[in-house]
Amino acid sequence: MDEAATPVLCPAARGIWRRWAGLLAGLATMGVFVFVIAPAVQHWRPVWAVHTFVEERGIDASALFYTESEEFGRVQRHMQDAMRFAPQPSQGKSHHTGGGG
Amino acid sequence: MAGNESPETSAGAEPEPQASESRWSELWKKEDYWAIWLGFLLLVVGLVVFLGKPPEGMEQTIEKANVVMEAQSQQAPFKTVAWYQAHDTKAKVKSTSEPFAKSIGKWISKPHGWKTDPVDSFYLNEKGAQGKREAATPKYEEAKGKTAGLLAEAEAAEAAAGAADFENEGLNGKAVEAIGAWRTAKEEESAAKKKADVKPYVQIGYLALLGVLLAGFFGVGVRCMGQPMARFLVGFSFVFVIAVVAYVCAGQATMKTYGIEYAAWAIAIGLLISNTVGTPKWVMPAVQTEYYIKTGLVLLGAEILFGKILTIGIPGIFVAWVVTPIVLVSTYIFGQKVLKIPSKTLNITISADMSVCGVSAAIATASACRAKKEELTLAVGLSLVFTSIMMIAMPMAIKAMGMDHVLGGAWMGGTIDATGAVAAAGAFLSDRALYVAATIKMIQNVLIGVIAFCVAVYWCAKVEAEPSKRVSVMEIWYRFPKFVIGFIVASIAFSVIYEYLGSDVGATVIDNGVIGGFTETFRGWFFCLAFVSIGLATDFRELAHYFRGGKPLILYVCGQTLNLALTLLMAYIMFFKVFPDIAAKI
C-alpha cells in the first residue's frame, strides 16, 4: 500500500484524539463500574444481604453528615424520648425496656 | 485545595497579611469573610422562614404526646405500644412537611434517585410514576397487613403482661419481643410506603434556576474580591453541570447502597476531565474550591449542635469524645514519628478522616490546616474504600461473634468513617444497634467543630511558626483561617437557639426545618461544587506522588486498628460495666 495515500494525523491532532479517547474510556469505565461490576459484586452473599436490606429500607448509605440521613433523624428522636421517658424498672420486672431487635 | 493554584500552594493559599497590612477592607475582599457573610445570609434567611412559620398545633401535639409517654413510662417497665404511638405522633410533626417547605425543597433539591434510567433523575411523567406506584403497591399492602397483625400481637402480649401487673418477667419479655417485631415491621412498612407514593416531577427547570441563583450568589463575592464576574459566571455553568452529574451518579440505587457519595463522583469526574481533555481555560475562573468549601463549612457549623452530645449520656461522650481525640492524636504522632510522612497536613487530614467521621471531618480539618487539594482527595478515596468494606464486614463479624447489639452498635458508630454507612450497618444488625451506632456517630459528628478549631490554632501557633520563636496572640489571629470563626459562631448560635427552643421544638423547626429543609441542601451543593473544582484542578501524577510508598494507606490501617480496639474496649466498659442502666433504656 502506498504510504503517501494513508491519511496521517499530525502530532497535535493525534494528541487531541488521544485525549478524547481517554475521556471516553474513562466514562465507559465508570459505566462498567456502575452497571456491571458493582451489581455483580452485590451478588456475593455477604454483600447481597446487606445491600438488599439497605435498598429495601431506603437507607442512604452515602450520607456525608448526620443531618443528611433520615435514619439519624428517627434515631435522634427515639433516643431523646427513650432517655427522657424511660420506663422505670422495678424489682421482679423485666429490665429490658424494648426498642426492637 | 484551591482550584486555580499550583499544586505546591496550599488550600488556604492566600498571601498571609502582616499585622500592619491588615485592613478593614479584608472584610469584603477576602474569601474567608465572604464565606462567612454568604453562609450567615442563608442561615438567617432559614431561621426567619422556618421559625416564623412553625407547624400548626405543634406545641399541643408535642405536649399531648409527652404526657402519654410520661404516663406509660410509669405504668410498665418497658416501652408500651401507646408509648411508641405517642412517640410516632410527635415525630410526624416537622416543619419540612409544611407546604411552603415542600415548595422550597423543590427549588433547591438535588437530582432524584434512579435505578436503570438516569433520566429519572430529572423527569418522571404521570405514566412512569403510576408504573412505579403499581409495582411497589403490592409490597406496601403486604407490609401494611403484616404490621397490623404484629400490632395486634403486641397489644395482646402487652395486655397479658399488664394482667400480671407487669410482675411476670416471662410475660414482660414476650411483650418486649412482640413490640420489637411490630416496630421492625413498621419501619419496613414505612419504607415500602415511600416507594408506593411516587409522584411525577420535572426537576430540570428547577436545577437550571438553582444554577443561575448560585452563580449570582457566589458571583457577588467574586466581583467584590476584584475578579471579573462575567468570566466567573460563564465558568460556573460548567462547574455546576458537573456537580449535577456527580449527584446523578451518586443517586443511582446501587451506588447509594455502596455508600459512594457525591464527593467521590465529583472528584472522579473532575479528575477525568482535567487529566484527559483538560479543564477548559474559560472554566478556571469558576474553579474556586476554597470559596465553595468555606461557605459550605460555615453552613455545616449550624449542623453541629453541642446539646446532642448528651443524647446517650456519659457513655456516648466517652466512646465518641474521649476515644476519638486519643486515636486522632496517636495516629498523627505515629505518622510523624514512625512513618515519617513528609506532609503534616496530609497526616492530620487522614487521621481526622479515619478517626472522626470520614469526608466531612476531612473537609473541615483540611481547610483548617490549609491542606493541599491532592491530600484531601487522597483522604476521601481512602475513606470511601474502607467504609465500603467495613459497612459489610462489621455487622457480619458482630453477628458471627454473637456480640450484644448495643456494644456492636457503639463499636460500629465509633469506627465506621462515613455517617450514612453507619446507619446502613446499624440498621442491618438491629434497631437497637442502629440507635446506639447512629447516636455515637452523631456525637462524633459534633466533634468536628472542636477538632477544626484546635487544628487551626495548632497550625497557626506551632506548625506554621518558625521553630524556637514564640508566636504572639496577634500573629495567631492574623494567620488564623477566619472562616473557622464563622463556622464556630454558627455552631454556638444554633446550639443556643436549639437549647432555648427545647429538644422537641428544636427537632421540629431546626433539625426538620432550617437545617433539614434549607441549609443542609445548600451545604451539599457547595461541597459538591468544591469537589468538582478539586477534580478539575488536580493533576493525577501529583496524586500518585502523595501516595508514594503507600504510607497514607499504612497510616490509615494502623490508625483504624487502634480505633477498633480502643472503641470496643471503651464501649464495653461504659455500656456494660459503668453504666449498664443506659444500655437497658435503649
Image (tube, helix red, strand yellow):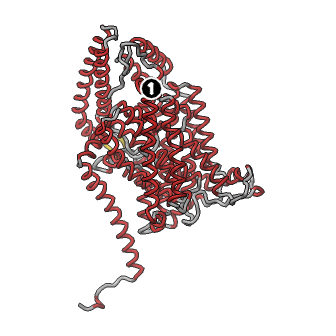
Question: Can residue B365 be seen?
Answer: yes
Picture quadrant of residue B491: top right
Picture mark count: 1
**Circle 1 crowding by C-alpha within 10 Å: few under 14, some 14–19, many from 20:** many
Q: Report the front residue among B542 and B6.
A: B542
B401 left or right, relative to B494: left
Among the 4 quarters of the image, the one containing residue B492: top right
User: Vertically, is B214 above or below B80?
Assistant: below
Seen from the viewer's position, the closer of residues B242 and A66 is A66
Q: Which residue is mark 1?
A: B582
Q: Quadrant of the N terminus of chain B?
A: bottom right
Q: Residue at x 32, y 20 (%)?
A: B176
Q: Amino acid at mark 1?
A: Ile
Tell whether B148 sits left or right of B340.
left
- Is residue B99 at all visible to an observer of this figure? no
In the image, residue B482 lies at what x, y percent? Answer: 65, 49
Q: Quick check: B315 above or below B463?
A: above
Q: Residue at x 59, y 49 (%)?
A: B455
From the viewer's perspective, tell me whether residue B558 is left or right of residue B429: right
Where residue B202 sits: x, y (%)?
37, 44
- The quadrant of the image that shows the C terminus of chain B is top left
Q: Quadrant of residue B80?
A: top left
x and y percentages locating residue A4 in the rendered image: 30, 91
Q: Determine the chain carrying the residue at label 1.
A: B
Q: Looking at the picture, does residue B565 appear above or below residue B62?
A: below
Q: Residue furthest right?
A: B20
Secondary structure under badge 1? helix
Q: Position of residue B117 (x, y in %)?
A: 29, 50
